[in-house]
Amino acid sequence: MTVITLIGKRQAHVGNEFEYMGRTTKCIECPLRKVCCDKLEPNRVYTVISVRDRAHDCPLHEDGVQLVEVEEAGATVTLPTHQLFEGAVFTVHVRPCDKWDCEYHEACNPTGIRDGDRCRVEKVHQRAGLKCSRRRKLGLADVTRVS
């Protein structure tokens, strides 16, 4: 699903990904709040898919904000091997891991994906054999969140 919103002019280029962190106190009284803040979900990652010709001043962004069309970004995640089939829909169950130096830490703890989200496997990168320090049988895949 695509959403029309406002982001900083410096970030407004096709393909840019950003994590929406939520509104600030400066946003509460802003007349653009409904377009800028209220259509995005905090702590989700979005990809700019088109940039519109409309710009506005903004107290947070030095160069102002630009009207853009965004969609929620997918993520590359680790999954148990039994869930690694393209098209499979599953519920995310976060597997906490404190191994910060592991090359798969980011894929085990992806930004924008939360415990309980329903996701679809879009592409399988590695069906099995990840060297998990916790001895979990994991593979690697691209997923998108589904409603």
Image (tube, rainbow, N blue to C red):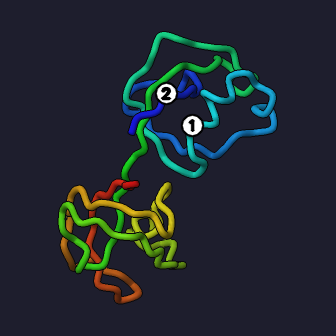
Q: Amino acid at mark 2?
A: Ile
- SS at badge 1: loop
- The residue carrying mark 1 is 39
Label drawn at residue 92: none
For residue 65, which quarter of the picture?
top right
- The one nearer the camera, 9 or 90, is 90
Please tell me which residue is depicted at 40% across the width and 54% down the height of the picture.
147
Spatial CA span between label 1 and label 2: 8 Å
Q: Residues within 10 Å of mark 1 (few under 14, many from 20)?
A: few
Q: Residue furthest front?
A: 147
Answer with left or right where residue 139 lies relative to residue 5: left
- The residue carrying mark 2 is 4
- The one nearer the camera, 107 or 40, is 40
Do labels 1 and 2 touch, CB within 8 Å?
A: yes
Q: Is residue 39 above or below residue 56?
A: below
Horizontal and vertical percent position of residue 72: 43, 44
Q: Amino acid at mark 1?
A: Lys
Q: Residues within 10 Å of mark 2 (few under 14, many from 20)?
A: some
